Every structure is written in structure tokens, then in C-alpha cells.
Image: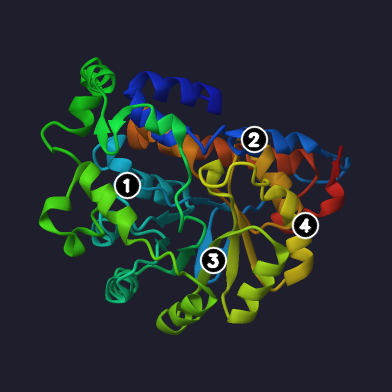
Amino acid sequence: MLTNWDELKRKAQRTLPAFAFSYIAGGADDEKTLAHNMAVFDRWQFAPAVLKDASQRDLTTRLGRSCFRAPLLIAPTGYNGMLRHQADLMLARAAVAQGIGHIQSTVSTSSIEQVAAASDGPRWFQLYVLKDRDVTRDLIDRAGKAGCEALVVSVDAVHFGNRERDKRHYRQPMKLSFKAMLDIACHPGWLRRTLIPHGMPGFGNLTPYLPKQFQKGMGAAAYFASQMDQTLSWQTLAWIRELWQGPLYIKGVMTPEDALRAKQLGTDGVVLSNHGGRQLDGNASPMLMLAATRQAVGNDFTLLIDSGFRRGTDVVKALALGADAVLLGRPLLCAVAAGGERLVALTLANMIQEVDRTLAQLGCRSIAELHPEMVFKT
């Protein structure tokens, strides 16, 4: 049985062709931020209280209109159909099974409507703002009609990071090298689970807006990249706030000042994130910004966080420092690649158990009892 991140990662690496594994495992430039995101958790150590009755624990988490069994959400991740056919639906159903949130990406392989039909749990939608305002407006409208309970606007991928590990598998942009194609031929299981008989996956949400020649595969990815709005600003977010009446979160914030400005704009919270180390190499971990951001925005504003979380102990450290919940990405992508929906559900169950066990060992009966004095910085 696969029980931790290292085992999941090794199994996914064996399961996927190298170009697909590099896509989910890699980071920007020298990948220093990618490594920093995981190493940073060692800077905090627990100081547990003893002789406290923590025999019963409650992990219930309420965020806006949504109620979760535990303070976890599946992070929005794109082009998951490259890992396994219907991977987005598997992630959504596993979230329902474990009682946590699921955030669907603009660039998911399955559409908003397909995920809504497959999942009756709390769903959020992550929005990339595109140059065509009519397309952006329509995506927001579709998210509302599909029953999404919150909108999460990503603001840190306007200019794509330099992901060199990815590039090594291509002879030119969007054209796989001969070595990469030979490697694909050595992974017949992946071909059966992903491409046969379904063909190259596309972007389900964007299909209505893409020219016919860019409907699937690498062409779709290239076209989408060209449509990102590089003029994204606070004025754009104010426009989105007017369009979306439900809970609104801004993902990719990294400073207390920007978090406070988002609050003043009328958003309901932010996701502290460096995009998993896939954008700006040398970026700080959001964990280093968490306590100061909580102090800046107060307790009446939702702080979510991602980037580098691999253990339940990591999650509890973030909760103690002021986070309301944590978004999980890479571990679940490795799980869906290696074992499909069953392994995603098992990975989430293990993470929830780790969070619950850590609370018990800290003498806490609920998340509300966590506080910064329970961790100290080394």
C-alpha cells in the first residue's frame, strides 16, 4: 500500500511517460522554490500540551457557503487528462467521498458541467482571466449555473514560468522529441488508460471558444497561453467582484499588503501561493508570509494556503499560524496517475487521519484550539 508522498511520487514516475511526469513534478528554472516549499516546514516544530482530554476531535471547516469534513481542498490543476482519462472526475468524486472541497481549474480536461454531473459535493471554480472579456464573463456565468459555491481567481500565472524540466522533452515548442515519443511507446499501460480509444485530451471548459484546429492536445495548450490577459489588474478584479455574487477568493497572493488590498476590494479571502514553485524561482514559501498576513487582515478574512504540503503535520502547522484551510495538489496528481480514484481517496483519507492524529497529540479537540504558540520557529 502506498502510504506517503515519496511512495506516491515513485509510483507515478514509473506509471507515466517522462514528459507527463515532468509536467506534474517539475518547477521553474533551477527548481529552488520547488525544494524550498517542502523544506520550509522544518523551520517550525511543535510544542504540544499534555494532560488534556482530546479523545474526541472535530475537524469540521466552514468556508463561506461550504462546509467540509476537514480543512482541505483539492487545488485547481490543469490538463489532468494527460495523467489518466477522466482524472478530473476522479478527483471530484474522491473529494466528495472524503468530505472535502474540490476546486476545478479553467484548464481542466473535463468541463464544469461534466464535473457538476459527476459530483454532488461542494465545488469551487478557479478562473484564469482571458483577453476576451466575453469568454471570461461566460466562464463565470457557467460556474454559477453549474452550482459552484465559490470563485477563485488566479493572479500569479499571467506570465508563465520557465519550466526547463518540461522543455527537455520537446524538440521545439509543443513538439515532443523522438526520445520522448519512444518513452511513450514504453508505457503501454498509460496509453490504454489515457489515449486509447479516447485520443488526445483537450480543455473541456474552453472547447466552445477554441478554433477548431486548437481543440485538443498541444495546440490547445499553446492557444490558451496566447489568450492569457497580461493586463490583469486590481480594476479587473473589481469587475469580477461585480459579476460574481458569491464568495470570491484571489489565488497567488504573497504579501500582507496585497491580501489587505484584496480584503478592501470586497473579496472573501485569498490563497497564499507561489504556484507550487512553477512560476518565479527564488520566491518565498507562503508559509513565511502566513503569520504576518493574518495579522494584517484580521480574523474576519479567509486565508487559504498551498505550495509544498505533503503531510498532515504540514497542514496543522499552517492552521496554527493562521490558515483556515490548505489546498493539496501534487500528491493527488501522483495518486490519480498511479492508482486512479481509489488511490486519490486513500491519499486524502491518510491526510485527514494525519491531521486528526496531530491534533490529538497536541491536545486539541478542534481546529479552533490551534494557536501560534503551539509551534516555535527554529
What colouring does the structure picture have? Answer: rainbow
What residue does disc 1 label?
88
Please indicate, yes or no, whether residue 101 appears anywhere in the rendered image.
yes
Percent across and percent down for residue 12 are 40, 25
What residue does disc 3 label?
250
Judged left or right of residue 144, residue 41 is: right
What residue does disc 2 label?
38
Name which residue type carries label 4: Ala
What residue does disc 4 label?
291
Q: Are marks 3 and 1 in contact (CB under 8 Å)?
A: no
Where on the picture, by quarter, is residue 332?
A: top left
Mark with earlier residue (1, 4): 1
Please rate how many residues cluster around mark 2, counting C-alpha atoms within 10 Å: few if below 14, some from 14 to 19, many from 20: some
Q: What residue is rendered at 32% in x and 47% in y?
A: 88
Kindly report the distance in space between the C-alpha atoms of the residues bearing marks 1 and 2: 25 Å
Kindly report the distance in space between the C-alpha atoms of the residues bearing marks 3 and 1: 22 Å
